[in-house]
Amino acid sequence: MTKQEIFDKVASLVATHFSIEKEQVKNETDFVNDLHADSISIMEFIIDLEDNFEAEVTDDAAEGIATIGQLVAYIESVL
């Protein structure tokens, strides 16, 4: 899976989960500052993400991910 394919899939999941347009999702989109995500919504999103990519996002990794670009890079590294 290419980085662009990962981004597209993540963008679709973000758009659905956070009720925004997919086109608004950028690499620099910040979960807390731009999407106004709290810890519960982030954990629910991570669970959905893990199911869709069939990959685990560790708690330590999740705590270090602030932007969509960081998340895409992490997923690329574990696939």
Image (cartoon, grey):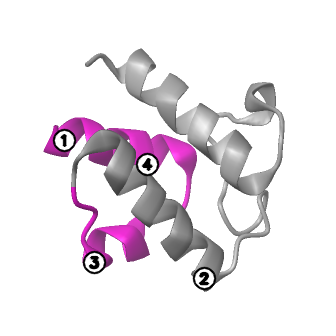
Residue 27 percent across, percent down from the top left: 58, 36
Reply yes or no: does residue 58 show up in magenta: yes
Gap between marks 3 and 2 measured at Cα: 16 Å
Image quadrant where residue 36 sits: bottom right
Chain part drawn in magenta = 56-79
Q: Mark 1 packing: few (<14 Cα in 10 Å), some, or many (20+)? A: few
Give how far apart the Cα atoms at labels 2 and 4 are: 19 Å
Please tell me the numbered disc located at residue 77.
1
Q: Amino acid at mark 1?
A: Ser
CA gap between label 4 and label 1 equals 11 Å
Q: Which residue is mark 3?
A: 60
Residue beneath disc 4: 70
Badge 3 amino acid: Asp
Query: How far from the left and from the top, in percent, is residue 26?
Result: 67, 34
Query: Disc 1 or 3, which lies upstream in sequence?
Result: 3
| Sequence order check, earlier mark of 4 and 1 | 4
* Crowd class of label 2 (few under 14; some 14 to 19; many from 20; radius 10 Å): few
Tags 1 and 3 touching, CB below 8 Å: no
SS under mark 1: helix
From what the image shows, is residue 61 above or below residue 17? below
SS at mark 4 in the image: helix
Q: Earlier in the sequence, mark 1 or mark 2?
A: 2
Residue 40, numbered circle = 2
